Amino acid sequence: MAQPNFTSGTVWTGDNLRMLRGMNSECVDLIYLDPPFNSNRVYEAPIGSKAAGAAFKDAWTLDDVDVHEHGELADRNPAAYSVIEAARQAHGKGMQSYLIFMAVRFLEMRRILKPTGSIHLHCDPTASHYLKLLMDAVFGRAAFRNEIVWCYRKWSTEAGQFAKNHDVILFYAAGDGGDPTFNVQFVATSKGTMKRWKGKRQQAVVVDGARQATATGEDARSPMSDWWEISIINPNAKERTGYPTQKPLALLDRIVRASSNPGDLILDPFCGCATTLVAADRLQRRWAGIDLSPLAVKLVDERIAADRGDMPWGGANALTDPPKRTDLGELPNYRTHRHRLYGEQEGVCASCGTHFPFRVMDVDHILPISRGGTDHPDNLQLLCSGCNRSKGGRTMAEWRAAQGAD
Ligand SMILES: C[S@@+](CC[C@H](N)C(=O)[O-])C[C@H]1O[C@@H](n2cnc3c(N)ncnc32)[C@H](O)[C@@H]1O
């Protein structure tokens, strides 16, 4: 497993895909993400709140995503590509665009998770069923652990349907054979329900290995289920920043406790007003966050400073450039792969499919270095000089799409 190539306490401002692509493989213990939900809304923080100025759009069209990445998915994960195609047919192009955006990021998240790591995706029924299929395609269906239902009361009703009072958190291991950290959490059960829970309580003792006082039953507890009742943040709550879609600390506290241990590294690639980072900091975990909004850095600093009180806090390591991977070893100059590639491709250009003599073949980066690609052999191919010149600094998928459009 690689060491992380960034320090704990880092918050990047910018698109998380660039940052994720620059992170070392297998270096993160837990990813929690609360991305836009495809809600077809624009969120803004109220004027005068700590988060005033924060806004993000959650409505999707094909113009919002790099459609070329759709083509790349066809190469890198055909199952994800098929799920997205099915979503386009069943739901439309908005869902298709949203899922392309999510899929390319999932591929990087899977790469950077340790084999003992896990991912918790926060979403709601607007897209949760499509996202479940996509996560099965990327992380593997055997990696699925729970669909956690977060219930709250909002008193909002729409005519002709039940009130929508829950979100969904999809919890997956890092991959099919993954063995993620999991600390059983407990809920206290009252005296009255003692009898009913007795069997489960004994099971909990076995799982946890802890002894519990059972004489009075007042401290009886049972393992937590996948159905969590936690209030949304009320308008006067101390933790409220005004950031649109801010999640309660109690929710993140539970996820961090269950799926990590002190010292573990937690990443929130859509960190918003830093709720995950504050919860991680309180529980002595290492942490890092990414958000498009520059307000994230300000809110992390304010919230963690307030939280730590007199304890020293030097502020987040605020960055805008992606990290540079250090886990690929000393890669030889990419041109040294020319002979090997010529043999593997049997002298045929990877694009036009024509056979050429060795001297007119060039080594090309499938994903250009400027877009987060590396000199790793998996990212190299041989193109004839004509195709290589025509492709220029584009990804293969972009170039193919441009050719299709001509
Ligand atoms: C639902 S909010 C997260 C709220 C957060 N969980 C909290 O408690 O504050 C989603 C966040 O994703 C950010 N975002 C959207 N697209 C992004 C991208 N491509 N890269 C990084 N952040 C992004 C938005 O700026 C917004 O802050």
Image (tube, grey):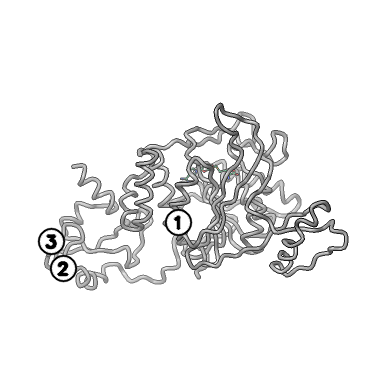
Q: Are marks 1 and 3 in contact (CB under 8 Å)?
A: no
Q: Position of residue 358 (x, y in %)?
A: 15, 69
Dividing the picture into quadrants, the one containing residue 120 is bottom right
* Closer to the camera in the image, 99 or 108: 99
In this view, 158 is above or below 343: above
* Numbered circle sitting on residue 201: none
Taking the image as drawn, is residue 21 in sight? no
**Above or below for 235 versus 148:** above
> In the drawing, what numbered circle is on residue 354?
3
The tag earlier along the polypeptide, 1 or 2, is 1
Distance from label 3 to label 2 (Cα)? Answer: 8 Å
Query: Pointer 1: residues within 10 angstroms few (<14), some, or many (20+)?
Result: some
Question: Which residue shows up at 46% across the image and 59% down it?
Answer: 141
Comparing marks 1 and 3, which lies closer to the viewer? 1
Label 3 beta carbon less than 8 Å to ligand 1: no
Does the rendering let one see residue 248?
yes
Q: Quadrant of the C terminus?
A: top left
Q: Which residue is mark 1?
A: 136
Amino acid type indicated by mark 3:
Thr
Q: Which mark is residue 347?
A: 2
Percent position of residue 82, x then y: 35, 51
Amino acid at dot 2: Gly
CA–CA distance in space, label 1 to label 3: 38 Å
Q: Is residue 136 left or right of residue 334?
A: right
What residue lies at 73% left-to-right and 55% top-to-bottom?
Answer: 187
Mark 3 element type: loop
> Observer-nearest residue: 348 or 290?
348
Lateral position of residue 10 relative to residue 391, left or right: right
Q: How many marks?
A: 3
Going from the N terminus, do you reach mark 1 or mark 3 first? 1
Between circles 1 and 2, the one closer to the viewer is: 1
Tag 1: amino acid: Asp
